[in-house]
Image (cartoon, rainbow, N blue to C red):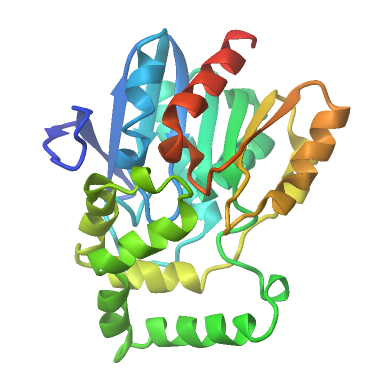
Amino acid sequence: MNTITANPTLENQLDQYTWTWKNHNIQYTVMGTGQPLLLIHGFGASIGHWRNNIPSLAAVGYQVFALDLLGFGASSKPPIDYSMELWQQLIYDFWSEHINQPTVFVGNSIGALLSLMILADYPEISTGGILINCAGGLNHRPQELNFPLRFIMGMFTKLVSSPALGPFIFKQVRQKYRIRSTLKQVYINKEAVTDELVEIIHRPSCDAGAQKVFASILTAPAGPHPSELLPKIQVPLLVIWGENDPWTPISGAKIYQDLADKVESIQFKPIPNTGHCAHDERPTIVNSLILDWLAKQ
């Protein structure tokens, strides 16, 4: 049974519902009527990260769904092995139960990679995909990091996973001032780093089980690389890229740029002076790009 719950994190009056998946509670929202869109957030984020996008998209003839992936937001945080494949199954099952008609999948960061996975493996359920600064994997593959960063990340992962030190380190990582500092590194538009945004990310990190989720994800397999998935895509793609993203720099977008030059169904739209979360950093621009593209499909 679906139940509406209150969550003051979502200041845009997004109704939230709880869906039970494999005995875990999954939080989701839906707004509007019409062509369905399913929004999938990135690492450490939640439904609230789309608060500046959902109302605008729902207001003009789209039924907009968004969910908190297992382990994030207000969804359950069980001590299990997390992976891209686990979330892919969650998304497919959510689509089957709540949407069940061809959908446009929209994602940011690992949410964009999950969208690509859905488009590649379940082409019959989609009409298109919108990728916003798509991640290359759930984690950096060791070969993608140069020394000494490879060593530093390896040590940090071991410490966070330690039963003795992990909870202490995680408590330091999730301090609000550290979250704000990290956001200011990945948001070029510093005005978008608001108290509301910090709270959206901080609150779920205080939930029981959040530290073990964090440790599990840091040690999880990276998942498929976009280069493995793109040859399987049969539907139109809109690729939006914040040009100044320090996590997935514009050089990581070359594969999409090259495809857009060759394939008419793929459009590549870079946004200057913008970082990793373009949809939240420049929502007016991103909403306009999305709606213009949808209108032409």
> Residue 48: image x %, image y %?
30, 40
Q: Residue at x 52, y 49 (%)?
A: 276
Q: Quadrant of residue 270?
A: top right
Q: How many marks?
A: 0
Along the horizontal axis of the image, is 255 left or right of 193?
Answer: right
Which image quarter holds the N terminus? top left
In which image quadrant can residue 54 be found? top left
x then y, percent, for residue 61: 42, 7
251 relative to 74 in the view: left or right: right
Left or right placement of residue 85 versus residue 67 in this view: right
Which of the pair 289/161 is nearer the observer?
A: 289
Q: Is residue 274 visible?
A: yes
Give the residue displayed 63% in from the left and 40% down from the top: 116
| Quadrant in which the C terminus is drawn | top right
For this view, does 80 lie left or right of residue 89?
left
Q: Position of residue 16 (x, y in %)?
A: 21, 33
